[in-house]
Image (spheres, helix red, strand yellow):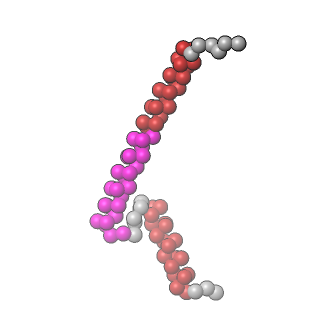
Amino acid sequence: MGNPAGDKKKLKEKRRNRQELRLGPGAYLPKDQRAVLQAEIKKGEEVVKAAREARGKEKAAAKKAAPAAKAAAPAPAK
């Protein structure tokens, strides 16, 4: 036996989560607000994707440069 208001809140939250899984973020919002939210999320995802690609290119360039730098470095004197 629990608080009826808390139980209703929990059920509503579960319903919202299921809707978001099925329909995307902001599924419980009005249609115009949902479109704005989803556009912002998409823009953010594109920024993250571009940053990841840039980081991948930097890593690849560093990996290519590492053997060349190692070969160019003088051997340590013993």
What's the residue at 42%, 46% (across, down)? 48
Q: Quadrant of the C terminus?
A: top right
Residue 42, magenta (yes or no): yes
76 sits to left or right of 72: right
20 sits to left or right of 30: right
Residue 24 picture quarter: bottom left
Asked if 46 appears above or below 71 in the picture, the reply is below
53 sits to left or right of 3: left
Give the farthest residue toward the left. 32
Q: Quadrant of the N terminus?
A: bottom right
What's the residue at 33%, 56% (across, down)? 39
Whole-percent x, y for residue 38 in the image:
36, 58
Whole-percent x, y for residue 37 in the image:
35, 61
Asked if 63 appears above or below 13 in the picture, the reply is above
Whole-percent x, y for residue 41 in the image:
38, 55
What's the residue at 31%, 61% (across, down)? 36
What's the residue at 50%, 22% (across, down)? 65
Residue 71 picture quarter: top right
| Magenta-colored span | 29-52
Asked if 27 appears above or below 56 in the picture, the reply is below
Name the chief secondary structure element in magenta: helix
Residue 62, magenta (yes or no): no
51 sits to left or right of 36: right
- Which sits in the foreground, 52 or 32? 52
Give the farthest residue toward the front. 77
